[in-house]
Amino acid sequence: MMPKILVTADPLDPPALVAALTGTDPDDGAVASFVGQVRAEPGLQTLELEHYPGVTETALAELRELAMSRWSLSQAIIHHRVGRMAVGETIVVVAASAPHRRAALEAVGFLIDRLKTEAPFWKRVHTAGGSHWVTARDSDAAASQYWRDQIAQEDA
């Protein structure tokens, strides 16, 4: 059985992960996914991700459970790489299945946006000139806040 939450230094296989959710529940009409990969940036040789073992998996599991209940998902997975990765390598796969497409799509958007700010991962960029830690982006905080606001409005 495929783990629902996985943080690993091993390469991820996005097609296999999405395929594992496809066709498993006859009531599901949708499987949605997001695959994040290392993008080419000037001078980038590798991207390194570190995490806080145990705490990171707990944070991801809590986000997953919230998405499962909020969008009545059949399944949801979050698989995230750590360690050094080259341009083009997969960093994260988030996927969800549900009876209807809107639920699956929204859940995947929620999961990727919230994990960027709530799961303890740290990015380090390695270039020919040295290495530096990447600070959080305002756009990631804004995306996470969007989902907080959406949930607050729905709960009001």
Image (spheres, rainbow, N blue to C red):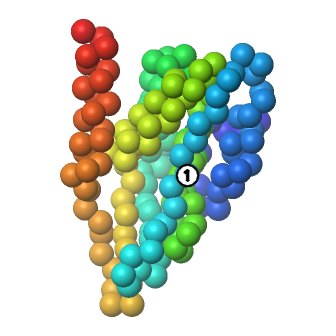
Tell which of 70 and 85 is nearer to you.
70
The C terminus: image quadrant? top left
Q: Which residue extends farthest bottom?
A: 129
User: Residue visible at 46% across and 82% down?
Assistant: 45
Q: Which residue extends farthest top?
A: 156
User: Residue visible at 65% across and 56% down?
Assistant: 12
Residue tagged by mark 1? 35
Say left or right for 131 vs 31. left
Say left or right for 106 vs 134. right
* Residue type at tag 1: Val
The picture quadrant where one finds residue 136 is bottom left
The image position of residue 129, as x and y in percent, is: 33, 90
Say left or right for 135 vs 130. left
The N terminus: image quadrant? top right
Q: Secondary structure at mark 1?
A: strand
The image position of residue 41, as x and y in percent, is: 39, 76
Q: Does residue 128 appear in the picture of this structure?
A: yes
